[in-house]
Image (spheres, helix red, strand yellow):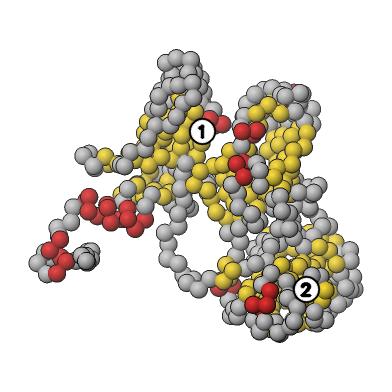
Amino acid sequence: MVQTSYFWDGTSVGDSTLAPYDDAEIATIMDDIYGYFVVPGYLFGTQIAGDELAVKGDTANPGKVIVYPGVAMVRGVLYIVDEEVTLDVPATAGANPAIYRVILDKDTVNQTVRVEIKQGAEAATPRPPTVASNEVSIAWLYVTGAYDHTIDLFDDSLIHDERVFKYIGPDAQRHVFENILHNPEFMATSGGTNTAPDGWVLVNTPATSFGTGGGRTVRGKWVRFQGGAGEGIETTVPINRGSTMDGEIWTIRGYIEVDAQSLTVDVYVDILDGGTILFDSKTFWVMASPGAGTEGITEFIMRIRINPLSTEQNAIRIVITSDNAATDAYIGDMAVIPGYVAGTKESVRKSELIWLDNAIADVNWTATAKSTGTTTISLNVDFGGIIPRGVRGVVLRVRCRDSGSAGAAVADGTSIKLYAYTSTIPSAVVSCTGLPNDEWESGLGWVSIWPNDTSSRFAVVVTASGAGTLDATLEIIGIIT
């Protein structure tokens, strides 16, 4: 068994005899540690998050694409570009299309990494060119047959993202706990004002609203409920642990802020078995603001032990209500965690947005002609059926164009809207209304997935200027766990 260690001073003692180290050795070690990735959040100037080394069509110059600034690790070498790079897209010679790749090429002879286009062969069914061992691909381009790069603008809908994102900063929290509560820290809604947060229900009929910041000290997004005594929100958290829960400690934690000195808010916790309450509701926590005209915020932490019972416990119910006739409470950053957790926000694994290495497309939503109507998407079947069960939401790149967009009479007259399943309020809208006819518009949107929906559904509403006039493209580029 050979044991080796790197890096050491000198050249005569122990593993330092492997020195001097050349660039190939160092790059190999760095590649073994990190692999290839684009560094997220490394932005230049007015660049927005998500555009790190993104490839987009040049809307002003025919036959060109633009690579945005960014930082990447390429086969063990750090690559930095701090301004946009414009690349020429070669024309296709015949009627057949081709697939090109935008690659980062590591040249060991010239000792550089540069971005360039690598052409694939033209064919009736084209395939992308192979990525060599000294290359990484950040996008591939579908180049149509008879494409003339001196005349034709290159369309964003023909660019497919292949970037891989990875965080390389230190992991400050080594002991991570799983938050099993749906929609916890965001307390977001797909239903709008006077509805419950996604995954929650209203208790009686409080007025609700949603937001972020705005002077609130509740971190993240919050839900505000207003109403009379006994009004609020509740949720049921399936735990499905069976008899293994006997004697187990669970932690329930959240943040609440109130405005009025007279206001108190109660948090109740029930242990359920098939909907039957095994323990009577009890008040675990009550708070009020410290004085008139001031705002009180409390991080509440409750720990409960599941007592040994003959029946299996399968859910925890949380009810948050007001004691008072005038309610003005803000709630955010909720967590239900198996085990004992100290009172630190950082020790909880929150919902996580995971950017996908490659966008997931669907044949029915790839520059496909659409008429006005509603389509229900089931992630169990659509988009290849490869999105795992249990995701709390998906992030989509949405593109649309309409042959009658310039003459659309009303706002959003030619548009695509995303809805959580059964919701009546869209969570995202991408509209090409008012643009020149057949000009693409694009945007990002997220839509929540109900945890108890076994089909993992959401709805897409298309508004077109006529029959089959709107071309629509949907790609899943991230999932929310």
Q: Distance between the Cα atoms at labels 1 and 2?
A: 51 Å
Q: Is residue 317 above or below residue 146?
A: below
Q: Earlier in the sequence, mark 1 or mark 2?
A: 1
Q: Which residue is mark 2?
A: 273
Give the quarter of the image for residue 360.
top right
Coordinates of residue 174 in the picture (x, y in percent): 47, 72
Residue type, label 2: Asp
Image x and y of residue 395, in percent: 62, 48
The reply to whether residue 329 is visible in this rendering is no
Location of the C terminus by quadrant is: bottom right
- From the viewer's perspective, tell me whether residue 228 is left or right of residue 65: right
Pick the front one: 288 or 11: 11
Residue in the image at 68% along x and 31% along y: 432
331 lies above or below 359: below
* Residue at x-position 49% and y-position 21%: 124
Element marked by disc 2: strand
Which x, y percent locates residue 373?
78, 33
Compare residues 133 and 60 and report the one nearer the observer.
Answer: 133
